[in-house]
Amino acid sequence: MAIQDTIDVVLAPLMESSLMTAALESMPTEDLVEVWTLLDFVYWAIDKRRKAMREHLLRRAEKYGRATDKGGQRLRVGGAKIVRQRRVGTLPEEAAVRKLLDEANIDRSRGFSTTTKVVVDVSKLEGLVNLGLLEEDAIEAAKKVSWALKVQPDLSLSSLLEEALAPTHPESTKTVRAKKPQSQGPRKGGA
């Protein structure tokens, strides 16, 4: 596979296209929806491929790499370096600790601490409103407001995307509708 061909034929034209360069303020809403849907689909397909590649790279680094002093492996491929690095969380997982304590017949209180957490008590706030000490509008204004974006693509566009995926991923053609019925905006880890 020649990465330069992919850059020249796919990436560069995409990045230079009106899809990526058009002023969003001047785009009709219908075009925004179509471009959003297309980019969302491309993001989904790329993310799925990246996750599969990650697993393969981890396995190859483990199999062919040289051991590191921290228990991982390092593999050089051309000018690139792949590192399989062991990461350990700072705290044990709660479920695993519960299981360990239960198996050893140790009371859970010996492995866990109970803490007090301060939370907003809605019934107390309602009481303060009823007493006239707080205004209901002020409490409403204190609530966080965010906006979800859900874009339901036009079925003809969904069909086009399914057809584009079918030649290389026939098993995934149903996935577009089954797993991607609507866009939810940025994903975890995304912008």
Image: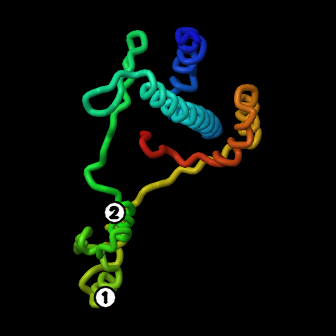
* Number of dots carrying numbers: 2
Residues 36 and 73: in front is 73
Amino acid type shown at disc 1? Gly
- The residue at the point 34 percent across, 31 percent down is 72
Separation (CA) of disc 1 from disc 2: 41 Å
Read off the residue under disc 1.
127
Residue 81 visible at all: yes
| Quadrant in the rendering for residue 136 | bottom left
**Residue 71 vs residue 53: left or right?**
left
**Residue 45 vs residue 110: left or right?**
right
Read off the residue under disc 2.
97
Q: Is residue 68 above or below residue 117?
A: above
Q: Earlier in the sequence, mark 1 or mark 2?
A: 2
> Residue 37: image x %, image y %?
62, 38
- The residue at the point 42 percent across, 42 percent down is 189
Residues 180 and 106: in front is 106
Secondary element type, mark 1: helix
**Residue 188 vs residue 37: left or right?**
left
Residues 121 and 126: in front is 121
> Residue 26: image x %, image y %?
54, 32
Label at residue 99: none
